[in-house]
Image (spheres, helix red, strand yellow):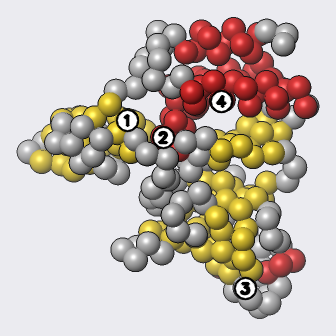
């Protein structure tokens, strides 16, 4: 059955602390998890998060994101992560041995990367890492942007929605938690995947969405 995301309001009980851990936009009190803001309830990896009903990406450590290089220095890269503040990728946090001043040999201006949020401090300094398995430079393909709060709907429960899109388009697709999605494949597949994702974004709060998306993907047009 197509499950409609639930909306939380401030001070609303959104979960049991015995089953879940408080994530972003929540706090724990007397064994219950409460929401601190208006947003969508998202349960991921035993955490309960409240995704704000605004278009701004709120980075937290552990998020996998798609970033774009905007500046290069001798020891790091400045990365646009679709957040109010840019992120920093230091040479110590990439999978290559980079000599001082040779950063541009590895990542150039406008290059896209798959990275993970390593740290966000109280001054809004954001650090990234690419040293974990599966993180890399994104070659080819194209990137589209959606509202970050719609990302869980694009992925679907246990990855069902994104698997459906991959199946019917034959595309490789990577969804960043910052609202950026990388798509690579044949032109017609990329176009159909993009249409499906845009439809999900527009109709995220409606019932029966999975059925409608599958119908769109099966169509020849």
Q: At numbered mark 2, what does the secondary structure look like: helix, strand or loop? A: helix
Q: Are marks 2 and 1 in contact (CB under 8 Å)?
A: yes
Residue 210 rendering spot, x and y as whole percentages: 58, 15
Q: Which residue is mark 2?
A: 149
Sequence-wise first label, 2 or 3: 3
Q: At numbered mark 1, what does the secondary structure look like: helix, strand or loop? A: strand
Sequence-wise first label, 2 or 1: 1
The quarter of the picture where residue 197 lies is: top right
Tell me the CA gap for discs 4 and 1.
19 Å
| Residue extending farthest bottom | 100
Tell me the CA gap for discs 2 and 3.
32 Å
Q: Which residue is mark 3?
A: 73
Q: Which residue is mark 1?
A: 40
Sequence-wise first label, 3 or 4: 3
Question: Disc 4 vs disc 1: which is toward the camera?
Answer: 4
Tell me the CA gap for discs 4 and 2.
13 Å
Residue 6 in the image: above or below residue 132 = above
Sequence-wise first label, 4 or 2: 2
Q: Residue at x 72, y 77 (%)?
A: 71
Q: At numbered mark 3, what does the secondary structure look like: helix, strand or loop? A: loop
- Would residue 160 be found to the left or right of residue 21 on screen? right
Q: Residue at x 41, y 20 (%)?
A: 4
Residue 117 in the image: above or below residue 106 = above
Residue 146 rendering spot, x and y as whole percentages: 61, 41
- Would residue 176 be found to the left or right of residue 17 on screen? right
Sequence-wise first label, 4 or 1: 1
Q: Which residue is mark 4?
A: 198
Tell me the CA gap for discs 1 and 3.
38 Å
The quarter of the picture where residue 87 lies is: bottom right
Residue 98 in the image: above or below residue 53 = below
């Amino acid at each position: 059955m197509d499950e409609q995301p639930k909306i939380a309001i401030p001070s609303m009980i959104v979960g049991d602390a015995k089953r879940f851990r408080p994530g972003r936009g929540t706090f724990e009190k007397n064994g219950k998890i409460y929401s601190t803001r208006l947003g969508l309830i998202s349960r991921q990896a035993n955490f309960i998060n409240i995704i704000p009903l605004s278009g701004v990406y709120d980075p937290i450590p552990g998020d996998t994101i798609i970033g774009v290089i905007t500046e290069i220095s001798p020891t790091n890269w400045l990365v646009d992560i679709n957040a109010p503040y840019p992120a920093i990728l230091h040479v110590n946090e990439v999978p290559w041995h980079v000599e001082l001043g040779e950063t541009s040999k590895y990542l150039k201006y406008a290059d896209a990367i798959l990275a993970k949020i390593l740290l966000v401090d109280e001054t809004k300094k954001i650090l990234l890492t690419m040293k974990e398995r599966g993180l890399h430079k994104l070659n080819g393909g194209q990137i589209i942007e959606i509202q970050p709060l719609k990302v869980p709907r694009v992925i679907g429960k246990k990855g069902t929605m994104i698997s459906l899109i991959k199946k019917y388009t034959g595309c490789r697709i990577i969804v960043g938690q910052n609202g950026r999605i990388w798509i690579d494949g044949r032109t017609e597949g990329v176009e159909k995947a993009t249409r499906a994702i845009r439809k999900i974004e527009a109709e995220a709060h409606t019932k029966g969405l999975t059925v409608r998306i599958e119908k769109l993907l099966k169509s020849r047009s």
